[in-house]
Each structure stands twice: as structure tokens, then as C-alpha cells.
Amino acid sequence: MKYTLSDGRELDLSRVVEVSSIRDEGIDPNSISMSRIAFQIQLKRHETISVHRSYHFSDWAEVKIELEKERKRLLEQLKAFRSGTAD
């Protein structure tokens, strides 16, 4: 079953091994004033997909909540897929 992340990337739920917790990765290497928060999706064959958001320090809570929602949606779809109740 395919799952589409909010950024448009698709992944096959049958290949998902693990979904990490959300971590603050510190300063975004592509920006001077932004930091990055992310979680990783570990796939079979040792592939990893990083789902991240950049944020300014004053926007941290809002961005974390948004990322938590995305991770929760993914985990719910993964659970439904594994239990055979996915639509």
C-alpha cells in the first residue's frame, strides 16, 4: 500500500521497518537562522527517509505539532496496513 507524505513523496508501507521519534536536529545546514526538527522512516534494504521541517526558534512549538500530526497519521496508516484494515 502506498502512503503519500505531506511533501508529496510516496512510500510503500510494506517496506517500513521503523518510524523514529521526533528529534531536534539543531541548525539547518542550508540556512543561517533556521533550525530543523525531523523524524526518520527506516525502510527495508537499509534505506531511510527523513521527514523534516525547518523552523525559526519562535515557531518551534507550531512546527513540532505539525510534524507530530504527520507522524501520527503515518503510524495510524501503518498500523491499519499491518492489521489488514487499511482502505
Image (tube, rainbow, N blue to C red):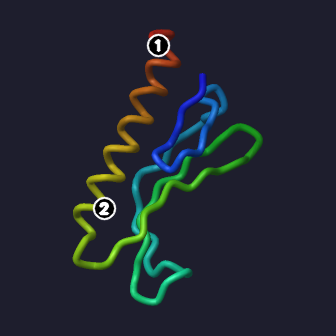
Which residue extends farthest right? 45
Horizontally, residue 86 falls left or right of residue 57, namely: right
Residue 52 coordinates in the image, percent (x, y): 47, 60
Residue drawn at x 41%, y 65% is 37
Circle 1 residue:
87
Disc 2 is placed on an element classified as: helix
In this rendering, the answer to whether 53 lies above or below 39 is below
The image quarter containing residue 34 is bottom left
In this rendering, the answer to whether 18 lies above or below 12 is below
Quarter that holds the N terminus? top right
Between the C-alphas of marks 2 and 1, the distance is 29 Å
Residue drawn at x 50%, y 50% is 7
> Mark 2 or 1 closer to N-term?
2
- Neighbours of disc 1 within 10 Å: few (<14), some (14-19), many (20+): few
Residue 71 coordinates in the image, percent (x, y): 40, 43
Residue drawn at x 56%, y 55% is 50
- Contact? badges 2 and 1 (CB < 8 Å): no
In this rendering, the answer to whether 50 lies above or below 10 is below
Horizontally, residue 23 falls left or right of residue 51, namely: left
Residue 74 coordinates in the image, percent (x, y): 44, 35
Q: Which mark is residue 69?
A: none
Say what amino acid the circle numbered 2 marks.
Val
- Neighbours of disc 2 within 10 Å: few (<14), some (14-19), many (20+): some
Say what amino acid the circle numbered 1 marks.
Asp
The image quarter containing residue 9 is top right
Seen from the viewer's position, the closer of residues 79 and 55 is: 55
Disc 1 is placed on an element classified as: loop
Circle 2 residue:
63
Horizontally, residue 8 falls left or right of residue 75, namely: right
